[in-house]
Image (cartoon, rainbow, N blue to C red):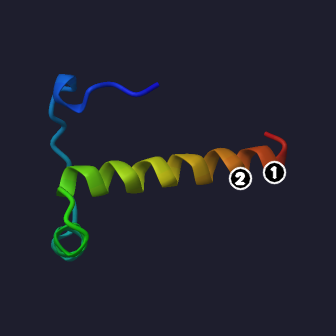
Amino acid sequence: MRVNIREIAPCAVRMQPYLKRWFQEYAKENDRSVNYVLNEALEFFKQHKEEEKKIAGI
């Protein structure tokens, strides 16, 4: 289910400086916001973990 991103309350996340720089650079290179890129990465991670569970039969 997709929600309008502007309706979601901000969430402060602490991350290592090297990761922050990487996401900033990646976002800039791809003409995206850091928020968009982080959401994309989190969604990928979620799908990957759900698939691992399915394969393991959990």
Rendered position, 23 above or below 58: below
Rendered position, 45 above or below 30: above
Q: Nearer the viewer, residue 2 or 23?
A: 2
The disc labelled 1 sits on which kind of residue? Ile
How far is mark 2 from mark 1, CA to CA? 5 Å
* Residue pointed to by mark 2: 52
Residue 24 screen position, x and y as percent: 16, 69
The residue drawn where x is 81% and y is 50% is 56
The disc labelled 2 sits on which kind of residue? Glu
Residue 49 screen position, x and y as percent: 61, 50
Residue 1 visible at all: yes
* Residue pointed to by mark 1: 55
Dot 1 falls on a residue whose secondary structure is helix
Do labels 2 and 1 touch, CB within 8 Å?
A: yes
Name the quarter where the C terminus is drawn.
Answer: top right
Of all residues shown, which one is farthest toward the right?
Answer: 57
Residue 50 screen position, x and y as percent: 65, 44
Which of the numbered marks, if any, corresponds to residue 18?
A: none
The residue drawn where x is 24% and y is 32% is 5
The residue drawn where x is 17% and y is 56% is 33
Residue 27 screen position, x and y as percent: 22, 66
Crowd around label 2: few <14 · some 14–19 · many ≥20 (10 Å): few
Dot 2 falls on a residue whose secondary structure is helix
Crowd around label 1: few <14 · some 14–19 · many ≥20 (10 Å): few
Q: Nearer the viewer, residue 22 or 12?
A: 22
Which image quarter: residue 48? bottom right
Residue 14 visible at all: no
